[in-house]
Image (cartoon, rainbow, N blue to C red):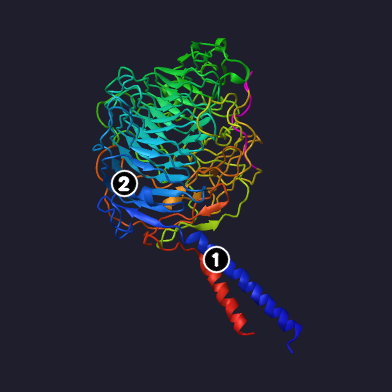
Amino acid sequence: MKSAASTSKRVRQHSLLIWLFAGLGLFVAKNVFATEYYVSPTGSDSNPGTQASPWGTVQKAASTAAAGDTVWLRGGTYSPSAGITFSKSGTSDTNRIKYWAYPGEVPKIDFSNMSVSSSGYSMGITVSGSWLHFKGIEECCLKETTYANNGFDVSGSNDIFELLNMHNNMGNGIFMGTKSGGGNLILNCDSHDNYDPTTSQGDGQNADGFGVHYQASGATTIIRGCRAWWNSDDGYDLINQEISVTVENSWAFGCGYSNYGAGKPADGNGNGFKMGSSKNGVRHLVQNNVAWGNKASGFYANHSAGGNTWYNNTSFQNGTQYNMLASTWDSAGNRTDGVTLSGAKAHILRNNIGYPNKNSYMDATYGVDTQFNTWDLNITPAAKDFLSITDTSVGGTGQAIETTSLALGPRQADGSLPNVDFLKLAAGSAMIDKGTDVKLPFVGAAPDLGAYEYGATGGTPATGGTPATGGTPATGGTPATGGTPATGGTTGAGGRSGSGGTTGAGGRGGAGGTPAAGAPGSGGSSAVGGSPGTGGTPAGGTPGTGGTPAGGAPGSGGTPAGGSPGTGGTPAVGGTPATGGRTASSSTSSAVNTGGTVGIGGSVVATGGSVLVGGTTGGLPASGGVASTVPVGTGGTPATGGTPTGTTSGTTNSTGTAPASSGGCSCRLAGAESTSYSGFALLALAMFALRLRRKR
């Protein structure tokens, strides 16, 4: 008779086997269906879409890829004869469909040969799917007849648009226009030289760089680290947008002009940041941005029935620096301009620079809560206050200046804006330590005025260790272990401050209906830490307790923007926080997610952690990526060959997982299983259990 101990041992062995095989089953179910596909201008849609035999059109990939899949677009020029539609969706932040440039290459989608309608719109790239991620794509040259056609026309939600270069379209570079979308992230993108000369609404009336419009319900969209220049209408336009939008760490210059700044379209508006026309008074957050040389205003409220929150912006040599024009509408849609806003509807302006101080609708007559700005402090900015006020982007030239303008130069390795001296404060500037605490990080006794904090240089970005030099780009990854965001330090910016909190936003609503009334989004948001500085270092900092409500302190008669703090994100588990950077402000309520993470495509990300929107634990990852090595503009065709090096451990996302990203030779064939070390570990344990069973 066998002993009770022997029987107990057998039971334990069977239990171990059951759990091990269950784990293996879950692992296989999670990873076996994630597929990588390849597209090349020299491929064919009759091919299987593998690296060795790629497809020939982007539309083939868009029609085939499913949630969790990655489509690698090889370098070269694609010339479709029709628009491209992305209607299929991912399912979550960790199960997106990715359409990424193959590492080290630039796929260019040129719509010059596309036939456009004379009786309706003909969009270049239509994105109705959600949970998608586009990265490293150049798009250009969409034509028009009497309708302004957009390069990217977006109605999906929770999508990421990263490192896109959109130019020379007869319409917007990217246009988000849906009543029920939202929650999108536009990260480190360029949109320029868009001009609609024959639109039915006038010469140059509808070609913006970035447009977010018509949303009546849903989550906040964020625009971060972007550049808009020489667009015939406006750089950034939020007309008829009734859900809060955050625009931060971005530049706009030369808008309202065409032909490399030499032309002046008769009907182009020419504002850098046109943040308004809300009929219900929604509050947008506009912070750490720079506008220069725009035909009309650098920063414009555009008839909104409610005010925005404007923190630490720099406006230089625009037609008008800040224009806070407010309006109301009656039930018939008739507008009354120049009204006075009060209470929670008032504009809030803090720590902004106007050079020169030339504003409109700014004083207390119009209910504007303006304090600690150059015009309030009787500071007259002068050249000696800045490291540089010269750049070839100042003024029209009639020729491309991508190779001569430092502001138009290549982005940094993490995708952030170039680290240039232009409009950064110099030692002894009258604007150093003259601001007030708005819950953005600062150095010294008080915040500086403008978009750049003097002395916040930090060091080198965190690298997160040395990436592997080979292997297959995985589509899975290892779950993140969580943690709490740091409260100290912020990304160094070569003199530039990091971003602050973002306006909260609620959940998505249905399409149609009347624009929602009232305050900004229904959720809260945590501080996002801002875009990485230009050449700075993410600071380490002390673990903190969560995020900080956006908007900051209430103005004198206003209320702070944003809402309650978000539920917190998770910092990246990969990468080593840099030890440099500046210390956080003296405010104890400000929290910045710090510590860089190893970014996608083998690049370094130091954007401050996950962005929390809508008060949820989800949100959009603040990822970086590989900056294009081809100068922005239209010249040249990138090589189609080359093999990237390196794999990375993935970026941390707000749901607590860290999907691994690409960087190696990208050798896995389409349809093959994704692999990870956890799979090998499970297999080893199963073999060990079987060995135990044989020893019974």
Q: Residue 256, image x and y in percent?
A: 34, 22
Q: Tell me the amino acid under the disc marked 1.
A: Gly
Q: Residue 420, image x and y in percent?
A: 40, 35
Residue tagged 2: 107
Q: How far apart are marks 2 and 1 (CA)?
A: 38 Å
* Residue that appears at 60% across and 76% down: 689
Could you tell me if the residues under marks 2 and 1 are in contact, i.e. CB atoms within 8 Å? no
Q: Magenta residues, as a range?
A: 546-558
Q: Residue 174, image x and y in percent?
A: 39, 34
Q: Can residue 495 be seen in this view?
A: no
Left or right: 402 in relation to 572: left
Q: Quadrant of residue 688?
A: bottom right
Left or right: 576 in relation to 343: left
Q: How many labels does the image show?
A: 2
* Residue that appears at 47% across and 36% down: 224
Q: Can residue 662 be seen in this view?
A: yes
Q: How crowded is mark 1: few (under 14 residues within 10 Å), some or many (20 or more)?
A: few
Is 38 or 377 nearer to us in this picture? 38
Q: Tell me the amino acid under the disc marked 2.
A: Pro
For the N terminus, the image quarter is bottom right
Residue tagged 1: 25
Q: Residues within 10 Å of mark 2 (few under 14, many from 20)?
A: many
Q: What element carries label 1?
A: helix
Left or right: 398 in relation to 212: left
